[in-house]
Amino acid sequence: MPPGSAVLVGESAEPTRISVIDFDEKHVDTRPLCSIEETLLFRDTATVTWINITGLHDVEVIEAIGQAYGIHPLVIEDILHLGQRPKIEFFDGYIFTVIKMIRVEEETGALDVEQVSLILGPSFVMTFQEKEGDVLDPLRKRIHEGKGRIRKSGADYLFYAIIDIIVDNYFVVLDHLAENLDELEEQVISSVDLSVLNTLHKIRRELIRLRKNIGPMREELAVLYREEDILITDNTLPYFHDLHDHIIRIIENLDTMRELVSGLRELYLSGVSTRTNEIMKVLTLVGTLFIPLTFIVGVYGMNFTYMPELKWRWGYPLVWFIMLLIAAGMIRYFRKKNWI
């Protein structure tokens, strides 16, 4: 298909819903929108407007919103491509960015990675989400309660606040993985269960996945606070610098955890190797112990007609005594050498 074609790439079966939060320092208005025309009421206002679109299944609606707000077709194409790499692009009159919202599912403990696309305009912020449910409820609460500087600032600060709360949730994800690694560290030391190794591999895959989805944001945010754009005011720029520092910390933590996983894997394999060597050592000693005993039994098991010892009255108990004496002597020798 030609560039700029509005085609959904990925899974997003939820119906498309549009909601808006319009606010200034004195008032806040929250409502669902039923038509594209309603969104145009908030395009050029003195208030700050947050337009949230959840569910990208209805491509025509997404395309119509883009046309209504003068969004480039290539941006609409990127919004509908759910496998996008985090990035930021500057256009005439708006800024477009892609970020990954990562959460821990409460029931399974698995990581849920969702693409969120943001568009910052002069007085509005658009967010495009794959599905209902996000980590942004604390921000919505701050807007409604008028806490902090969110209601006193412009759309650029709202743009920052949305990205900030998504990034802050990365620390929650890292804490979850760190707890799993702490539990695994104890199991690695005390157990050689194969499930421990499988869990380590699973966590390693999750860390690689996180690094892939978070890593590009370091350069993305660096570009954001380095670029001179009238949509980002001088008052808001320091917040993006702080956000960039958070991303660097998160990436460093991810790299540290990957090294820890590699270390635990090596420790596990070393433990398995040590236990295997101990087992082989015991088996070798047992086999060595039976070599002279087997020799004696083999000699007297030979089928010769003339073997004087076979006719001795005390021959049988004597052989047992000799074999026990040899076994005891070998065991004593093994202990002296600290082999057992």
Image: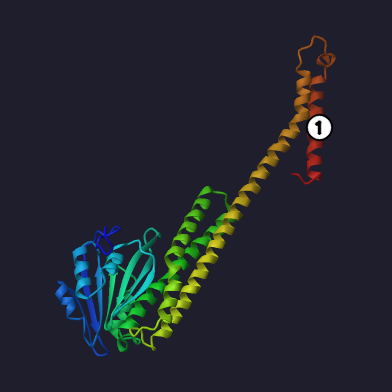
Q: Residue at x 64, y 44 (%)?
A: 276
Q: Is residue 30 above or below residue 316?
A: below
The residue at the point 47 percent across, 57 percent down is: 205
Q: Position of residue 277 (x, y in %)?
A: 67, 44
Q: Which residue is mark 1?
A: 326
Q: Quadrant of residue 103?
A: bottom left
Q: Measured along the vertical axis of the image, is residue 38 above or below residue 180?
A: below
The local crowd at label 1, few if under 14, some if 14 to 19, many if 20 or more residues have their Cα within 10 Å, is some
Q: Is residue 16 left or right of residue 241?
A: left
The residue at the far top in this view is 305
Camera-side residue of 22 and 82: 82
Front-lying residue, 191 or 329: 191
Residue 136: horizontal and vertical position, in percent? Answer: 33, 74
Q: For the residue labelled by badge 1, is the local secondary structure a helix, a strand or a loop?
A: helix
- Quadrant of the frame with the N terminus: bottom left
Res 226 visible = yes
The colouring scheme, among rainbow, by chain, secondary structure or one colour, is: rainbow
Task: Determine whether 97 is above or below 184 in the image.
Answer: below
Please identify the quadrant where the C terminus is shown: top right
Q: Quadrant of residue 324?
A: top right
Residue 33: name its quadrant. Answer: bottom left
